[in-house]
Amino acid sequence: MAQTFTQQDLVARLVRAGELEVSGEDPAEVVTYFDPERFRFHGPDGFESGFDGLTAYFASVREAFDDRSIRRGVVVAEGDRVACQTWIEGTFVREFTHSPAGPLPPNGRRVVFDLINIFRFDDAGRLVDEWVRTDNRSLLRQLGAEGR
């Protein structure tokens, strides 16, 4: 029998999943918020990935950035979908291997990833799709990759 999740439940699950991905504090708990077999990440410029790719991306963020945080705002929930704005911040202190321009050396600056996300959940309250849009030009400028 499938569980029934309220929109508040789904938002809370989304917030917690993001906190865990950014902090890296409990990888076993992270998996409980996703359907790792079906999850698809749909990113800027046609980039596609599964759960393993998302996990690798966040591992690279945790490696490259210190003092990380995540905030969600302008949250809209309807049915099995949640849309929001997300800000992930950190101080760029080690190589970032997963930047839109490839590996980049640190510049010591505070960087803000400003994202628009739409998430889809299954009947078990697990994330199965994420669509992301972001301003890669702004991000690359913050990363010190202008003109590359």
Image: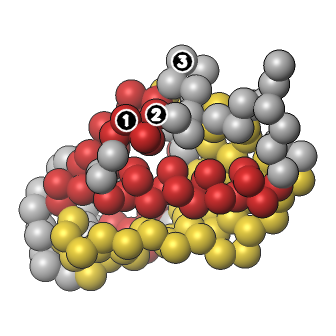
Sequence-first tag of 2 and 3: 2
Give amino acid for label 2: Val
Left or right: 64, with 110 as reference point: left
Q: Position of residue 49 (x, y in %)?
A: 48, 30
Choose mark 2 or mark 3, whichever is in front: 2
Residue in the image at 44% along x and 41% along y: 30
| Residue 36 is at least partly visible in this image | yes
Residue found farthest to the bottom: 109
**SS for callout 3:** loop
Front residue of this view, candidates 12 and 52: 12
Q: Which residue is mark 1?
A: 28
Give amino acid for label 1: Ala
Residue found farthest to the right: 79
Q: Position of residue 27 (x, y in %)?
A: 34, 40
**SS for callout 1:** helix
Left or right: 82, with 49 as reference point: right
Sequence-first tag of 1 and 3: 1
Left or right: 54, with 43 as reference point: left
Give amino acid for label 3: Glu
Q: Quadrant of residue 137?
A: bottom left
Q: Which residue is mark 3?
A: 37
Q: CA distance from mark 1 to mark 3?
A: 15 Å
Answer above or below: position of 78 versus 113: above
Image quarter (top left, top right, bottom left or bottom right) of the C terminus: bottom left
Residue 31's disc number? 2
The answer to whether the residues at label 1 and label 2 have Cβ atoms under 8 Å apart is yes
Q: Quadrant of residue 37?
A: top right
Q: CA distance from mark 2 to mark 3?
A: 11 Å
| Label 2 CA crowd tier, 10 Å (few <14, some 14–19, many 20+) | some
The answer to whether the residues at label 2 and label 3 have Cβ atoms under 8 Å apart is no
**SS for callout 2:** helix
